[in-house]
Image (spheres, rainbow, N blue to C red):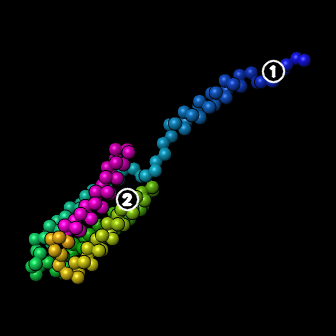
């Protein structure tokens, strides 16, 4: 019996070409799992960190004095709540920015806890040291993520 070659002439070359084009197209696509760098968030978080640190330094300097009461520092809490809310809303408005949003919500929770603690009584230097550590951890986490985004990581 006679064997008949039923292949389409040039089909192998065509198939290899299609595979090559698809491979090149897919390799040039990048999948972004997080949002890009946001300079406004970076600056806002840095500014809030500066305000918070200044507040903690002030609390340390008035420890044991009548000026340590919550009422004398209410303005800081009001302004800081606005700042952290602005950061949280901005972060939530940016697609694929869930981590920054969660971190800013944690920061808001820490601020609320500090305010509640301060309403109860003036803070000791040991309490302030612990609070500072927690705040700095949160600020650092947000800033590290934003800086990694800027580097494209």
Q: Quadrant of residue 22?
A: top right
Q: Quadrant of the C terminus?
A: top left
Taking the spot 20% from the left edge, 61% from the top edge, the residue there is: 50
Magenta: predominant secondary structure element?
A: helix
> Which numbered dot is residue 100?
2
Taking the spot 76% from the left edge, 24% from the top edge, the residue there is: 8
The location of residue 62, given as percent across then percent down, is 10, 74
Please, what secondary structure does the residue beneath circle 2 have?
Answer: helix
Which residues are drawn in magenta?
128-153
83 and 148: which is toward the camera? 148
Which residue is most to the right?
1
Count how many numbered circles sit on residues in the image.
Answer: 2
Identify whether 76 is placed above or below 93. below
The location of residue 7, given as percent across then percent down, is 77, 24
The location of residue 124, given as percent across then percent down, is 16, 74
Q: Quadrant of the N terminus?
A: top right
Q: Which residue is mark 1?
A: 5
Inspect this view and state whether residue 94 appears.
no
Circle nearer the N terminus (1, 2)? 1
85 and 134: which is toward the camera? 134
Which residue is most to the top?
2
Identify whether 83 is placed above or below 33. below
Does residue 30 appear to the left or right of 9 in the view shown?
left
């Amino acid at each position: 019996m006679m064997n008949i070659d039923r292949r389409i002439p040039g089909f192998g070359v065509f198939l290899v070409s299609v595979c090559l084009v698809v491979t090149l197209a897919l390799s040039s696509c990048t999948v972004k799992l997080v949002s890009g760098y946001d300079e406004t968030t970076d600056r806002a978080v840095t500014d809030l960190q500066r305000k918070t640190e200044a507040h903690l330094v002030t609390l340390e300097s008035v420890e044991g004095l009548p000026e340590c009461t919550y009422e004398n520092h209410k303005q800081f809490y009001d302004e800081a709540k606005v700042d952290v809310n602005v950061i949280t809303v901005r972060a939530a408005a940016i697609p694929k920015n869930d981590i920054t949003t969660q971190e800013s919500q944690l920061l808001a929770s820490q601020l609320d806890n500090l305010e509640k603690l301060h309403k109860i009584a003036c803070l000791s230097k040991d309490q302030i040291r612990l609070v500072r550590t927690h705040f700095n951890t949160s600020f650092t986490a947000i800033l590290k993520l934003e800086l990694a985004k800027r580097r494209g990581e």
